[in-house]
Image (tube, helix red, strand yellow):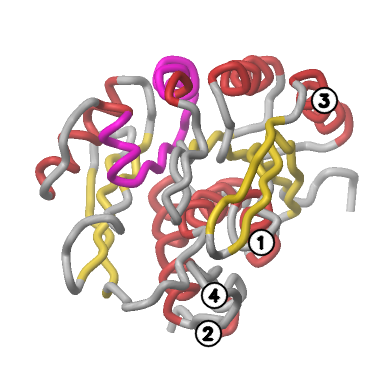
């Protein structure tokens, strides 16, 4: 095999010392999806299933050097962003994404951790909206993130559809609004609006579990992996929904709080 023929992906995000979210979840997902995952570390967290105890963003120079190192050697076919800390770091990441060709971009606009800790400074929301969202080939906000980015209040399915259209107006090509925060007792439904104007709903039975830490990271990483392997946007999003559904439905017992997903469930028949 010639150098760099194997599908390669990149996560640009923060670490999770607890192993369930962030870059750790991204790389586990990419590995399970049989692509090679690389990483640019933007921030480091002290974190477990009970919450985020502390975090620190890395110096921009070191982040820039990580981008340059990867561009000099690897052939990244698709990449994703996650936790980007603050406005200055969001801007720095955007500049690097414009400088280097790392393929299709999935943006997971991470703002708040499962336990409620803020992972994005307030002033950075505007920077994400104005600078990062327009670069997104796929944008995957949850309901609170979609509300922050659009200024809309989402209370029902029509609200999700309106928010998706507003996010496309901001420049995102394909939008997946995750409905996991919706107060629906039996279904978790995501709304997908594609760049060609087609739209559809993806629903799965809502499971009564606290083992959902890293769900958004996993979904966006699976989309990234599928795109790197040449899947179209709709197929990549559908694969990712099935992957996350299997990972939640076949839990592993780790930690005493919001536990992590089972990242190998999909390949063990968990999607059956």
The reply to whether callout 3 and callout 2 are in contact (CB within 8 Å) is: no
Question: x%, y% of residue 126?
Answer: 40, 18
Q: CA distance from mark 3 to mark 4?
A: 34 Å
Point 59% across, 74% down: residue: 255
Number of residues whose C-alpha sits closer than 10 Å to that of mark 4, classed few (under 14), some (14–19) or many (20 or more):
few
Q: CA distance from mark 4 to mark 1?
A: 11 Å
Circle nearer the N terminus (1, 3): 1
Q: Is residue 206 above or below residue 215?
A: below
| Foreground: disc 1 or disc 2 | 1
Magenta span contains residue 227:
no
Q: Kindly identify which residue carries mark 1.
A: 18
Q: Kindly identify which residue carries mark 2.
A: 269
| Foreground: disc 3 or disc 4 | 4
Q: Kindly identify which residue carries mark 3.
A: 62
Image quadrant assignment for residue 13: top right
The reply to whether callout 1 and callout 2 are in contact (CB within 8 Å) is: no
Question: x%, y% of residue 187?
Answer: 21, 69
Circle nearer the N terminus (3, 4): 3
Q: Residue 256: which disc? A: 4
Q: Which residues are magenta?
A: 125-148
| Foreground: disc 4 or disc 2 | 4
Q: Residue 104: which disc? A: none
Circle nearer the N terminus (3, 2): 3
Instruction: Identify which residue, 50 or 155, lies in the foreground.
Output: 50
């Amino acid at each position: 095999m010639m150098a760099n023929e194997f599908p390669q992906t990149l996560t640009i995000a923060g670490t999770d010392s607890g192993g369930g979210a962030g870059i750790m979840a991204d790389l586990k997902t990419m590995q399970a999806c049989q692509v090679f995952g690389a990483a640019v570390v933007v921030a480091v967290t002290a974190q477990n299933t009970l919450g985020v105890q502390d975090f620190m963003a890395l110096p921009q120079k070191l982040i820039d050097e990580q981008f340059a190192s990867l561009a000099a050697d690897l052939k990244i076919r698709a990449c994703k962003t996650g936790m980007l800390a603050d406005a200055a770091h969001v801007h720095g990441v955007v500049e690097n994404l414009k400088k280097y060709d790392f393929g299709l971009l999935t943006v997971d606009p991470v703002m708040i951790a499962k336990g409620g800790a803020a992972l994005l400074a307030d002033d950075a929301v505007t920077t994400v909206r104005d600078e990062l969202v327009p670069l997104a080939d796929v944008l995957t906000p949850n309901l609170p993130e979609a509300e922050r980015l659009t200024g809309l209040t989402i209370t029902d399915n029509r609200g999700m559809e309106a928010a998706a259209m507003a996010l496309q107006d901001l420049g995102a090509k394909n939008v997946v609004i995750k409905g996991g925060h919706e107060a629906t007792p039996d279904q978790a439904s995501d709304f997908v609006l594609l760049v060609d104007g087609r739209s559809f709903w993806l629903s799965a039975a809502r499971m009564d579990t606290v083992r959902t830490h890293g769900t958004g990271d996993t979904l966006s990483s699976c989309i990234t992996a599928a795109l790197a392997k040449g899947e179209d946007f709709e197929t990549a999003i559908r694969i990712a929904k099935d992957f996350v559904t299997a990972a939640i439905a076949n839990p592993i017992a780790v930690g005493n709080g919001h536990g992590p997903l089972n990242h190998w469930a999909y390949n063990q028949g968990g999607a059956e």
